[in-house]
Image: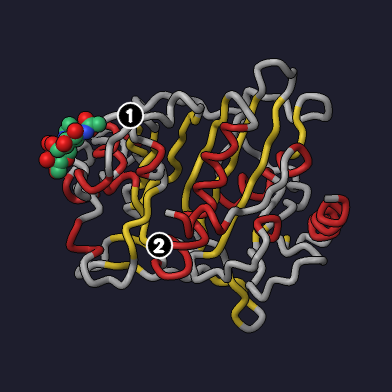
Amino acid sequence: MHRLVTFVAGALLGGGVIYTATRNSKSQQAPVPVPVSIPAPAPQLQVRSAPLDTSSETEFLTYGNPGPVSDFLVRSRYAASYNRALRNPNWVAEHLTQENLKGTADRANSEFKEDPNVPVQFRALLKDYFRSGYDRGHMCPAADAKKDNLSMNETFLLTNIAPQVGKGFNRNYWAIFEIFVRGLTKSFDDVYCITGPLYLPQKEGDKWVVKYEVIGNPPNVAVPTHFFKVILAKRKNEAGFAIGAFAMPNKEIDDSTPLTAFSLPIEAVEKAAGLQFFDKVERKAGVVTPLCSKIDCKLDHNAWKRK
Ligand SMILES: *[C@@H]1O[C@H](CO)[C@@H](O)[C@H](O)[C@H]1NC(C)=O
Ligand SMILES: *[C@@H]1O[C@H](CO)[C@@H](O)[C@H](O)[C@H]1NC(C)=O
C-alpha cells in the first residue's frame, strides 16, 4: 500500500499517469492508466462568479434544453445511470448482504432485453451485440439477483449491460471477481458496490488517445476499454467503513494475476469516470480503511471451477 501511495503521489506531482501495477506484481498484464491532470492556477479572468440565470428558463434555451439526460433507473436489486450517447450504463449500484443474495431464481429463465424505459433512438439493441464478438456483460451480476424471477430478469435489461470480452474476462477473471464481491458479505454486514465502464486514454506515439470500438451496424454501443468496481463495506459492530476500488482492462486476464494488481485509490477511479463515490462518507483515517488491509484481496479460482 505504501508503495502504491508513493507511486501515485509521484504521478500526481508530475501531472502524469497513475499505473496500478504494484511493484511486486508478477503480472504480465498492461497496467491500467488513469489520467491525472493538475490544473494550472487559473489566470484572473473577467467572469461572473455565478451565472446570471441558472434556471433552464434562460433565453438561450427558449426552444429546449438539449440535456444530457442520464436515465436514472431503479430496479429490485440495483439502481443505474444510463449514458444515452455511449449506450452503456455510467454506473450500476448495488447493496449486497447475505440476506439480499438469497433466492432460487435461475438465469436460465431470463433473456436479454432492450430497455423500454430508454427512448428507442438511445437504446442499446440486441442486434448491436449479435455477432459483435463481445459478451453482454452484466454490471449488476445475475447471481446477485436470485431473489425472484423479476429481479433476475431486470439484470438482463441492456441498460445493465456493457460489451465485455468473453473468454478470459467476462467468463473467467471478471466472473471470479464478482464471486469475490459476493464473498465480502461473509466478512461485512453491508456491502455497497458500484460497477461501471471506463474509456481510458492509451499512449500512441507521444500522444494520449481515447480509442474504443463501437458495435452495431449502424454503430451504436461503445465498447469500454476498462471496467471498475468500487466497494464500501461496513460491519454493524464497528465504526467506520472499508473502501476498495478496482479497475481492470476489458481483455483476457490471466488467472495468475493477483487482484491487488488492479487495486487503485478510489480518487483515481473518480477522476477517470467523472463520478463521486460514497460522498456521504468522510474520507479520512479513522473513518475509512482500505478494504485490502481488512481482508485478503485474493480471488478464489477454485470457487469458479467448482461451479
Ligand atoms: C421462475 O420461473 C420458472 C419458469 O416459469 C419457474 O419454474 C421458477 O419456479 C421461477 N422461480 C422463482 C424463484 O420464482
Ligand atoms: C422473466 O423473463 C422471462 C423470459 O423473457 C419471461 O418468460 C418471464 O415471464 C419473466 N418473469 C417475470 C417474473 O417477469
208 shown above or below 119: below
x and y, in percent, of residue 75 in the image: 32, 29
Residue at 43 percent of width and 31 percent of height: 101
Q: Which mark is residue 147?
A: 1
Q: Residue furthest bottom?
A: 205
Give the left or right position of residue 5, taking residue 140 as reference: right
Report whether residue 114 is seen: no
Q: Quick check: which quadrant has ligand 2?
A: top left
Q: Secondary structure at mark 2?
A: strand
Q: Which residue is mark 2?
A: 164
Query: What amino acid is at disc 1?
Result: Lys
| Label 2: few (<14), some (14–19) or many (≥20) C-alpha neighbours in 10 Å | many
Asked which quadrant contains residue 201, the reply is bottom right
Residue most toward the front? 306
Disc on res. 274: none
Q: Residues within 10 Å of mark 1 (few under 14, many from 20)?
A: some
Residue ID at (16%, 47%): 120
The residue depicted at 27 percent of the width and 71 percent of the height is 132
- Residue at 27% x, 48% y is 158
- Circle 1 sits in a helix, a strand or a loop, which is it? loop
Colour scheme shown: secondary structure
Amino acid type at mark 2: Gln
Q: Is residue 124 left or right of residue 187?
A: left
The front one of 301 and 207 is: 301
Closer to the chain start, of discs 1 and 2, is 1
